[in-house]
Image (tube, rainbow, N blue to C red):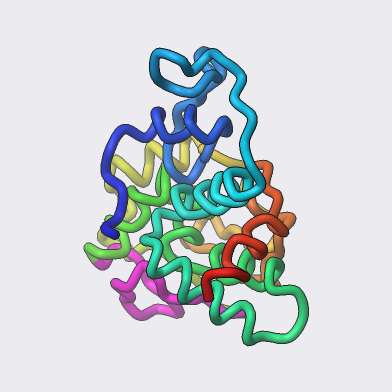
Amino acid sequence: MSRYTGPRLKVMRALGVDLPGLSRKTIADRPQPPGQHGAKQQRKSGFGLQLQEKQKLRFNYGLTERQMRRLMADARRSRGSAGDKLAELLERRLDNVVFRAGFAGSIPAARQLVNHKHVLVNGRAVDIPSFRVRVGDVVSIRPASRTLAVITASLADLALARPEWLAFDEAAFAVSVSHLPDVQDIPFPLEMQLVVEYYAQRL
């Protein structure tokens, strides 16, 4: 399954939640699901609730289903809670760090900055959006790219408040990873246990 490139607001309305990584828009004006019968209350089955929570993660972080399965498999192999580890792995992706640092207005925009080598990790260009940052890593914008309109506009009007696990250096156009994130750092309402249950029967 390829990465989703369709209407973003439609996805958020279907899931009933704002996904800041997907879009800066909000569903506040039209919170009901899209479609002719969207306003009608529809009860979801247990599977439907699990799928909905999983889709929130997949669309917010811009992943394919294959990538989600791979991350969940990694999370299950680690010690401790699989849900907490999955949240950590998602937040540690380089495209997400660029977004949470405020250098881009959404994760798709951050992914483009990474792909075009505008982003440095510890002073070296990294063009892999799925690159996992570690504690102590410094993620910065290449000096020649700091005047790009997309970056300056995003820094002037942050889509989200920066998480406390990232330390921002305004003068250096950089953030450093002070500690690893956890499930509390996911910036939208989520029942992580339902995501774990969804994949428990599929891995």
Is 121 in the magenta?
yes
The foreground one among 164 and 9 is 9
Characterize the magenta stretch by its predominant secondary structure.
loop
Is 106 in the magenta?
no
Q: How many marks?
A: 0
x, y (%) of residue 171? 50, 57
- Residue 54 drawn above or below residue 75: above
The image quadrant of residue 131 is bottom left
Q: Residue furthest right?
A: 80
Residue 198 is at least partly visible in this image: yes
Q: Is residue 202 left or right of residue 181?
A: left
Q: What residue is shown at x 63% (from left), y 64% (from top)? A: 87
> Which part of the image, by quadrant, shows the N terminus?
bottom left
Q: What residue is shown at x 36% (from left), y 67% (from top)? A: 129
The image quadrant of residue 80 is bottom right
x, y (%) of residue 162? 62, 49
x, y (%) of residue 191? 70, 50
- Residue 90 drawn above or below residue 158: below
x, y (%) of residue 139? 47, 69
The foreground one among 55 and 168 is 55
Q: What residue is shown at x 53% (from left), y 35% (from top)? A: 15
Q: Where does the magenta region start and end?
A: 117-135
